[in-house]
Image (spheres, rainbow, N blue to C red):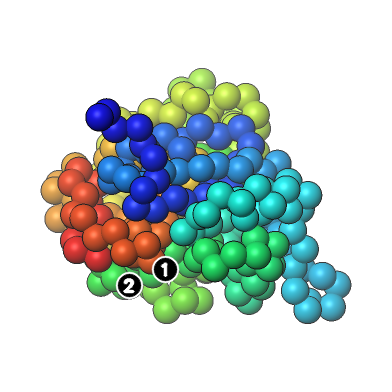
Amino acid sequence: MRNDNWGVRARIGLFIVGNEAVPEAEWWAMAPKGVSIHAARVIATSPWTRWRADRSGVELPEDMVRGCRQFGAMRLNAVVLAHTTSSVVGGAGWHEATVAAIGAALGTDALVTTNGHDTVAALRASGIRRPFLVVPAWYSEGTAVTAVGYYRERGFDPAGHLRMDPGPGWRAVPPEELYPRGFGFEQDVEALHAQIKAACPSTADGVLIGGTGFRCVALIEALETELGLPVVTANQASLWRCLQHAGVSDPIEGYGALLRSSR
């Protein structure tokens, strides 16, 4: 019988940006046989879950409530809030409050996690303490600096950061306008590869490419070989975390040491 991508070993649900195609494409590229990926789309502003006035917890936007209702009926092993920006700007305690709110709305025993939490776990598992942080062109410099602070607050000492240069024809476009104008579907991975190689400081002991809509997993193996450093990316890290939870331990070739090692 032919492979039909049925999630006989694990089914994973992703909350992703409403107009993005990258997360599903990268997850399907990396996922081992018998693991299926299912997306619910979110159009809320960052962070996707917002603190109540008394900070007693967070409220889920309507599209996430609907997604939880649907995911809750799908016998999923794990659900990921696959949005790096929400984690970065959510603040102290945001991950825990968001996991609690999604878990309550799901009403199942599926693992609930967030992309920021997953990247932190992947950095630690990879032995990276001084990551070179690479963020998408659609991040403002202020958001990039906030991202550096997010990882510093969690015990890392970032060796530097790079906001991708979007290239000719896009440099004059404000960061917040890049995605609405279609840059997400014109990302140049070869240019990203060259920029990371040129900018990675000698003090870095690894590379972290943040942003689930940032097309980059095709570069992991090449960068690890050429830089001699472990590379963690947003979608790779969340897939790794979910497979760990589901007990799927096959070494996955082609997408870096993190997925190649036994879980």
The residue that disc 2 covers is: 124
Q: Amino acid at mark 2?
A: Arg
Q: Label 1's element?
A: helix
Rendered location of residue 101, percent (x, y): 69, 67
Does residue 262 appear left or right of residue 233 in this picture?
left
Mark 1–mark 2 distance (CA, rounded to whole Å):
6 Å
Q: Element at badge 2?
A: helix
Seen at 61% across and 32% down, the residue is: 19
State which quarter of the image contains the N terminus. top left
Q: Is residue 100 left or right of residue 59?
A: left
Give the label on residue 104, or none: none
Q: Is residue 6 above or below residue 96?
A: above
Residue hosting label 1: 120
- Considering every residue shown, the one lying at the far top of the view is 169
In front here: 74 or 169?
A: 74
Observer-nearest residue: 108 or 140? 108
Tag 1 and tag 2, C-beta contact below 8 Å? yes
Task: Give above or below for 94 relative to 232.
Answer: below
The quadrant of the picture occupied by the C terminus is bottom left
